[in-house]
Amino acid sequence: MRRRPSPLAAVALTAAATLTLSACGSGDTSGSTDNSAEADRGGGTSSASPATPVPSPAGRPQLALPADLSYAFEWPKTGDKEKDAVLADSEQSIKAVDLAIVHQDALDEAYLYYYEAEAAAGTQKFIQNYVDQEATITGSYRFYAPQLAVRDDGTASFTYCEDQGKAYVKYLKNNEVRKTEVSAKSYVAYQTSLRKNGDGVWEIREISSQSGSADCQP
């Protein structure tokens, strides 16, 4: 996941690697910022920005994300029904992990709708890292360079890149946003394995990430 900014990034990416998981998300975790999954945002005493409902495909969880989080998905539709469904569910799954971080809930129902097996366990640890440090995420994320293969047996493999250069960790106790310089590690490669369940949802069952991937550098 999903996908995350750095000091939390180290911890985050360790969890991410276990997920091998910024995402999201989706990082470091030294108590500083995490520019790495899923960013990986929000606060207890924070002057949290109003939640912005995110349109969801029919039957999917509604995601109300803070206004200080934004996403750019450079994933053009393919014209293939199943491939486009994988892209849509993957986009929602990334946002759902970030929403769990905002909610400070490692068992948030929205992300569990999209994650199963090893990926669910790894993502839970990833989110819990933010909860333990009373940290959330803020800023903007860009996802690009998608490569997708859908098989006849109802499984798919999906790889993509994330630009976390403008995503940051925010600590809830004092609303401090820890900003880090953009570096090679701001660009993260993700690889996911998915399976279509009985309800037609493309669930992520395995996910791995590589911070500083050469394939994702600008």
Image (cartoon, rainbow, N blue to C red):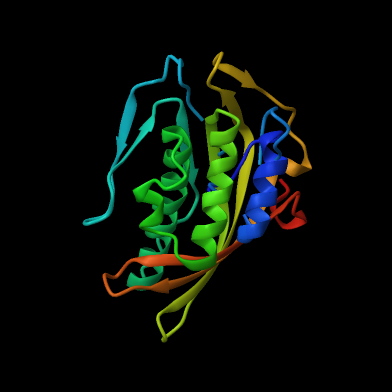
Q: Is residue 31 visible?
A: yes
Looking at the rendered structure, the number of numbered marks drawn on it comes to 0
Residue 37 shows in this picture: no
Q: What residue appears at the point 44 percent right and 60 percent down from the top-left corner?
A: 115
Relative to 111, say whether 156 is above or below: below
* Residue at screen point 41% across, 86% down: 152
Which residue is drawn at the image coordinates 53% and 30% (left, top)? Answer: 136
- Tell me where residue 213 appears, x and y as whole percent: 74, 54
Above or below 141: residue 42: above
Name the residue rendered at 66%, 22% in the picture. 178
Question: How far across and how far down the image is residue 149, in percent?
Answer: 51, 75
Q: Is residue 26 left or right of residue 87?
A: right
Res 159 → quadrant: bottom right
Q: Quadrant of the C terminus?
A: top right
Left or right for 22, reference 57: right
Considering every residue shown, the one lying at the far left of the view is 58
Relative image position of residue 65 (x, y in whole percent): 38, 34
Q: Position of residue 206 (x, y in %)?
A: 55, 67
Say whether residue 177 is left or right of residue 87.
right
Q: Quadrant of residue 9?
A: top right
